[in-house]
Image: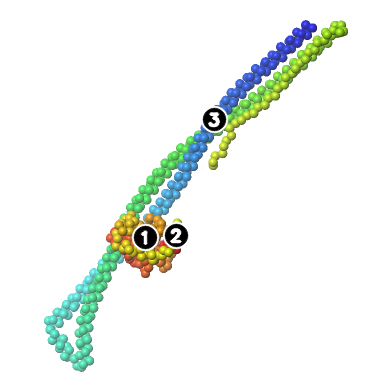
């Protein structure tokens, strides 16, 4: 009996020691898993911060890229406008050269007309002086020397025709000289207008080049910002990748630790069960041995053993990644081209002012056209270059009152009958003139 008790105590001690070791091992494993979980949480927090920063930088990149695209379109439009301006300057230069030749020719014609007028005047004076010196008797002698009435009448008619011819020739040359003078003045007005337009072109060219340079500088700044933003984005992506590797590593360590813990737990449970079974069998043998040396009727003892079983489960949670969000004018009712011209001609004689839009105080060519049409509810662009694209194009042979006649760097309103009205130059102001005085580039119809 004492031996049985000693064996039972010994088995209980061994079993308690085994259970204590299991508890200590489980505590160590829990502590190790806590360390893994802490590292994983830190990596997840760092990843989340990097993702948030990356999202912000990506928005910056998209914004800069959009602004770059918009700016590039503006630069391309300015480049196109500059090319058109330079082309118009070339056309204007050719027209100025031609106009100078026409003025030179007009000066030559004027000198010829003056000489012809002087020659005819000298001839008249010579005839008058001859008749004055000879007296009326010479005429009378000529008439009395007639051989017949028919000859007499012929001589009378001849004298009258000489007088009439002299007067007609003198008036003709005076008229010719005046026409040439008017033409010369008109050509000089047109030349003055073109020279003023040439100066305006140079000013526009300077402004356009300055605007392009400013926008190119802004584009360079955008390039620098974009480069920095992309470097930041690359750094944040690298951080996210590094934190993902840390998270995967810690999760792998957690998995391996859990597998080792599960294996150790199973081994300990198997060892505890084996030892418990061995203790039970030893106790049974001791009891059997004791029973064989005692009389019948002696009391018996029984021992029982209990086993323990445990089940464990684990669950993990991790952050989930969210998805990134990713003109033509319209004709007002009842307005006609004739209405437009009737309104426009009220301002003939008013001054020309570069950059102006006032029909009374002064306007340039495009400002005049824009303001006239604005009176009828039309919204036209400000520059002559832009007005070349308004409405719809028609040929000059189809031109109607109210159509815009477009020249190189100049616009005016067609009146009909081959005439235009517009703000011509600071010398001429708002006036009318022949529509074909310069090369017509386009005819645009605003009123449908």
Q: Is residue 345 left or right of residue 19?
A: left
Residue 203 seen in render: yes
Return the mark for residue 361. Answer: none
* Vertical comparison of 399 with 163: above or below: above
Label 3, residues with CA under 10 Å away: few <14, some 14-19, many ≥20? some
Q: In which quadrant will I find the C terminus?
A: bottom left
Name the residue rendered at 47%, 42% in the picture. 63
Residue identified by numbered label 2:
330
Q: Circle 2 sits in a helix, a strand or a loop, which is it?
A: loop
User: Of marks 1 and 2, which one's residue comes earlier in the chain?
Assistant: 2
Residue 271 x, y percent position in the rendering: 73, 18
Q: Which residue is drawn at the image coordinates 43% and 61% (left, top)?
A: 332
Q: Viewer-proximal residue, 242 or 50? A: 50
Q: Which corner quadrant of the image does residue 374 belong to?
A: bottom left
Closer-to-camera residue (310/263): 310
Q: Quadrant of residue 286?
A: top right
């Amino acid at each position: 009996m004492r031996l049985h008790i000693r064996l039972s105590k010994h088995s209980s001690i061994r079993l308690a020691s085994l259970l204590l070791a299991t508890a200590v091992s489980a505590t160590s494993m829990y502590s190790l898993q806590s360390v893994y979980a802490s590292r994983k949480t830190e990596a997840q927090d760092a990843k989340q911060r990097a993702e948030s920063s990356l999202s912000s930088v990506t928005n910056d990149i998209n914004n800069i890229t959009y602004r770059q695209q918009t700016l590039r379109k503006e630069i391309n439009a300015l480049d196109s406008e500059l090319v058109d301006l330079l082309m118009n300057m070339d056309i204007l230069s050719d027209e100025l050269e031609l106009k100078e030749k026409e003025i030179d020719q007009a000066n030559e014609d004027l000198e010829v007309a003056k000489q012809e007028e002087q020659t005819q005047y000298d001839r008249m004076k010579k005839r008058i002086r001859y008749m004055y010196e000879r007296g009326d008797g010479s005429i009378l002698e000529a008439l009395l020397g007639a051989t017949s009435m028919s000859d007499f009448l012929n001589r009378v008619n001849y004298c009258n025709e000489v007088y009439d011819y002299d007067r007609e020739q003198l008036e003709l040359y005076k008229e010719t000289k005046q026409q040439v003078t008017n033409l010369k003045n008109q050509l000089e007005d047109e030349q003055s207008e073109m020279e003023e337009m040439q100066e305006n072109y140079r000013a526009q060219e300077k402004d356009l080049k300055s605007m392009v340079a400013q926008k190119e500088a802004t584009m360079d700044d955008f390039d620098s910002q974009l480069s920095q933003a992309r470097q930041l984005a690359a750094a944040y992506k690298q951080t996210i990748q590094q934190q993902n590797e840390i998270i995967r590593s810690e999760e792998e360590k957690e998995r391996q630790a859990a597998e080792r813990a599960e294996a150790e737990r199973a081994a300990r449970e198997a060892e505890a069960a084996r030892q418990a079974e061995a203790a039970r069998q030893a106790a049974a043998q001791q009891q059997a041995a004791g029973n064989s040396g005692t009389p019948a009727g002696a009391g018996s003892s029984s021992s029982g053993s209990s086993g323990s079983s445990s089940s464990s489960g684990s669950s993990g949670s991790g952050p989930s990644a969210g998805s990134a969000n990713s003109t033509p004018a319209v004709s007002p009712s009842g307005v006609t081209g004739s209405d437009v011209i009737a309104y426009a001609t009220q301002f003939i004689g008013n001054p020309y002012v570069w950059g102006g839009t006032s029909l009374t105080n002064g306007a340039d060519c495009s400002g005049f056209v824009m303001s006239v049409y604005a009176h009828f509810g039309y919204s036209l662009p400000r520059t002559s270059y832009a007005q070349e694209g308004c409405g719809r194009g028609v040929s000059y042979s189809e031109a109607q009152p109210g159509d815009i006649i477009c020249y190189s760097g100049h616009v005016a309103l067609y009146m009909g009958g081959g005439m235009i009205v517009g703000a011509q130059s600071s010398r001429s102001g708002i006036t009318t003139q022949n529509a074909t005085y310069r090369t017509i580039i386009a005819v645009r119809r605003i009123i449908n």
